[in-house]
Amino acid sequence: MDRRILILSALLLVGCTSNGPSELELVLDKTNFESREKVLADSGDTYKLIAFYKQEIVRNDTTDLRIKLVESYLEAQDIESALFYLQQMDKVEGYQEQIAFLSAKAYYLQGEVDLAEKYALDALALQWVFPEVENLLGLIYAAKQQYPLARQYFNMARGHHYNDIVIKNNLAVVDLLEQNYQQAIFRLEALFNNGLADNQVRANLALAYAKLDQFEQVHHVLVGEYSTAEIQQIYLALRSTKVAEQAKL
């Protein structure tokens, strides 16, 4: 091939790739984003993660980034900011079910359970199998003291493979609210005995034991965190308190 043709071909190739980022540059940029995102997420500093997403939105505004930003605001319990960004995305095509779910979650965290119910049902109408929404509806109906309906939605989420620990704890809370303490213990003991109990599970298990006058079991659950004297005080407080004031969802 003529050497001049080779040079011209090379110049044309360079001209094409210089008009925008190359595929390699795009891959590297994505890798850099994911690496920085993971570092910040693993650090547990939600506000640094929020600042990172806002910076990225300035560079390249996408709905996916805005969804991540809203999720971070909810994690930080900054409900006002989460709702502000959700309202800006209200009409975005292809994301309606996710936006409805996050709106329901925001209103639930804000204590507006009727609005939370509305948006959660909207999300479920758009996506029939949606275990995150089903679990949230369980929480909403538990808050509204509609316990059979709460149990129905928790079991629906469980059937769609939602987190077992979360579902068992939430079902146990319904048991506690219905004063079925032995059933709550039955659900939570296996989690505790297998080292899967988080603070919420331990708190609810201790509450169930206390309601059945089982001090030794309360002591067994709490002994790693409190002294015996402190556990005695906690036990007496749990014995006399209303379940709705102590059960943890």
Image: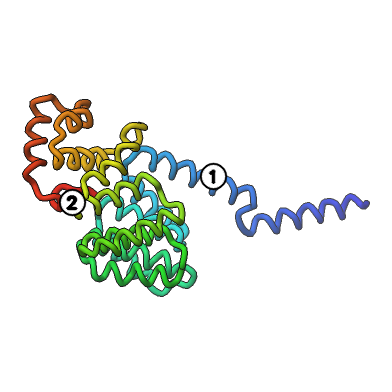
Q: Position of residue 203 (x, y in %)?
A: 21, 40
Residue plotted at (24% across, 51% down)? 175
Is residue 58 visible to us here? no
Residue at the spot of label 1: 31
Residue at the spot of label 2: 179
The residue closer to the viewer here, 167 or 85, is 167
Of badges 1 and 2, nearer the viewer stands: 2
The residue closer to the viewer here, 178 or 47, is 178
Is residue 115 visible to us here? yes
192, above or below 89, in the image: above
Q: Marks 1 and 2, how far apart in space?
A: 51 Å
Residue plotted at (25% across, 55% down)? 78
Check residue 191 in the rendering and tell me which mark sits there, or answer none. none
| Horizontal arrangement in the rendering, residue 2 relative to residue 140 (left or right) | right
Q: Position of residue 122 (x, y in %)?
A: 37, 72
15, above or below 99, in the image: above
99, above or below 229, in the image: below
The amino acid pointed to by label 1 is Thr
The amino acid pointed to by label 2 is Gln
The residue closer to the viewer here, 173 or 4, is 173
Mark 2 crowd level (few <14, some 14–19, many ≥20, 10 Å Cα): some
Quadrant of res 56: bottom left
Q: Position of residue 174 (x, y in %)?
A: 25, 54
Secondary structure under the numbered disc 1 in the rendered image: helix
Residue plotted at (33% across, 70% down)? 119
Quadrant of res 211: top left
Q: Position of residue 233 (x, y in %)?
A: 7, 33
Mark 1 crowd level (few <14, some 14–19, many ≥20, 10 Å Cα): few
Across the whole image, how many numbered discs are drawn on residues? Answer: 2
First in sequence: mark 1 or mark 2? Answer: 1
Secondary structure under the numbered disc 2 in the rendered image: loop
